[in-house]
Amino acid sequence: MYKKIKKIFKKININLRNLDKNIKYVVKKSNELYITILFDILLCKILYNISSYEYRIYEFYNISHYKRKTFLSKKRYELYKKLYINKNILNIINNKIKIYLRFKNYLNREVKNINDISYKEFENIILENKKILCRSVSSNFVSNHKIFNLNDYRGPGFILEKMKENNLLLVEKFFEQNEILNKISSSLVVINIGTLCYNKSIDVLSTTISFNENDKIIKGFIDCKTMKLKGHLRCNNEIYKEEEYNYKIPCLKEIISISKKMALELSEIKLVEWSFTINRDNEIYFVDANIWDDYEFVQLREYLNNKNGILPKLFKKNR
């Protein structure tokens, strides 16, 4: 009992410190009184299920009630997730071997499961290509893929052992990414399309890029109208680089179209983020599918300007 009480008080203390930290941040930005911001945050929690952290990153201190009510909070997201996601069928999307088999027509290249090929076949892949791209069978591609170079190892067997140790069971030959994507980062840049499929109708919820740089997941926002990156690249919703990129993302219309087709084919899972990359010959490669949860990033004010939040896109489907 004592441990439970101690745990509760510890959580309360953490929440109060976070609240204080967020209020002080907003006070500096808005020049409002501490007490004014405190009451406004409490009001927003009641009206919009918004936390003090969300109040800060969405810049609620700068927007009207009408705009505030269009924002999707974490608590509201969890409610919609329960409505749209059947937990009993998540193995379809969480097992990357299954998702690759289901959408093999969109892979546009050969991906092998090392459990299904002989050592000789694996050895030939390494010896012919020198570099290979491997990924986990369960984790997000961006956070859990690895490039192996034969020159860094004593032989193919050592690479195979390393792959098995890290559950990197899917292997393909290494490919050079599109020139524009390579300007954004020398790491493999992935284009993500978030979709909501409801009653055979598809809404695009988000268009972003992401990549892994020095073990940090970096994200960028794509403006669908211009098909260009907008604003800053960010890591954990904080600005990663001061410079702004204005590159036009190649093949975006085709990628969105493919995402919508795939969303219809996987209509039993309604909230999906589809991930693609593009090789130097402008061939589109499907690389991943995960439950869409990128609502925080795409609602940052830098990307929205004066536009509404993303809640109406989910709400209208549930009337």
Image (cartoon, rainbow, N blue to C red):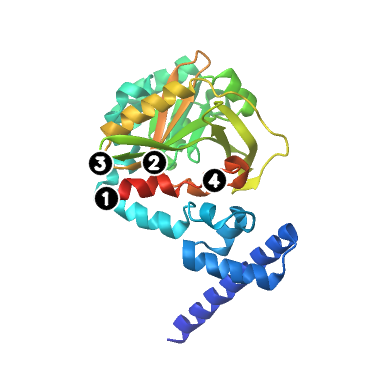
Q: Is mark 3 on a helix, strand or loop?
A: loop
Q: Residue reaching furthest bottom?
A: 2
Q: How far apart are marks 3 and 2 (CA)?
A: 13 Å
Tag 3 and tag 1, C-beta contact below 8 Å: yes
Q: Which numbered disc, 3 or 2, marks the residue closer to the eye?
A: 3
Residue closer to the observer: 86 or 91 = 86
Amino acid under label 4? Phe
Q: Where is residue 34 in the image (x, y as percent from the top left)?
A: 70, 70
Are circles 1 and 4 on residues that touch, CB within 8 Å? no
Residue at the spot of label 1: 86
* Pointer 4 or 3: first along the chain: 3
Which residue is pictured at 45% across the width and 23% down the height?
Answer: 253
Residue 268, disc: 3
Q: Residues within 10 Å of mark 4 (few under 14, many from 20)?
A: many
Where, by quadrant of the figure, is residue 101 drawn? top left
Could you tell me residue 37's position as x and y percent? 65, 67
Label 4 with label 2: CB-CB less than 8 Å: no
The kind of secondary structure element at disc 2 is strand
Q: Is residue 92 visible?
A: yes
Return the disc, 1 or 4, that comes first in the chain's sequence.
Answer: 1
Which residue position holds label 2?
290
